[in-house]
Image (spheres, helix red, strand yellow):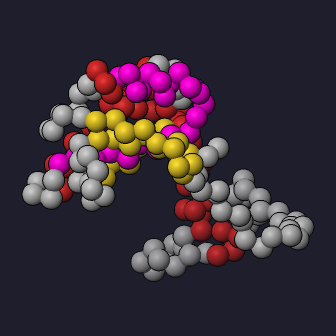
Amino acid sequence: MTHHAIRSGLLALSLVLAPLSAALAQEGDGIDINMDALKNRPTGMQPPAPEAPRPATSAATPKPAKEKTFTGRSVMVLFEPGSSVLAAGALKRLDEIAGQSKSQRLELKAYAGTEKQSASDTRRLALQRAIAVRGYLMDHGMDGTRIAVRPQGPAHDGQAPERVDVRYLEE
């Protein structure tokens, strides 16, 4: 910092503190404050303008965002146990999905492992699988903001435990 910048800063600080120091009384322990000096001090700030009355709205509460609903159509992408690498059969299915509609809203529900494995490990592997599927679809032209990733851990529905369900959502 240059000598000129330091002097400018000190000058600005003294201009700010001058009104406050004039307000402090000379007697006592320095705690007494001359309120008249503070009242007449310009602050450079104006009080906020009063708010204009707001017009009445027809709905008192905001409407919640419309939740995306499942269309009933889904595609199952299978994985080898313990792996998040996309197999050749999975690539074919994902190519079909990416080729249908680039703006389709999708949900990826990923499953991995069994009840015997730790919940942390199964969710981590499920997430890796969902990210692999999402990345492949994005690389093939789909909008990543329209693909929701939902790692589930172990499957409890009796279907293949090592999979990602690509679920189509309504617009």
Please name the residue shown 44% across and 21% down the image: 95
Give the left or right position of residue 136, taking residue 13 as reference. left
**Residue 7 appears anywhere in the view:** no
| Residue 4 locus on image (x, y percent) | 48, 26
Assess whether residue 54 is covered by the magenta stretch: no
| Residue 116 locus on image (x, y percent) | 9, 57
Answer above or below: position of 161 versus 4. Answer: below
Highlighted magenta segment, given as a residue range: 91-113
| Residue 138 locus on image (x, y percent) | 46, 25
Answer above or below: position of 39 versus 128. Answer: below
Q: Quadrant of the C terminus?
A: top right
Foreground pick, 38 / 72: 72
Say which quarter of the image contains residue 37.
bottom right
Q: Quadrant of the N terminus?
A: top left
Please name the residue shown 28% across and 21% down the image: 88
Please name the residue shown 38% across and 43% down the image: 165
Give the left or right position of residue 139, taking residue 168 as reference. left
| Count of numbered labels shown in the rendering | 0
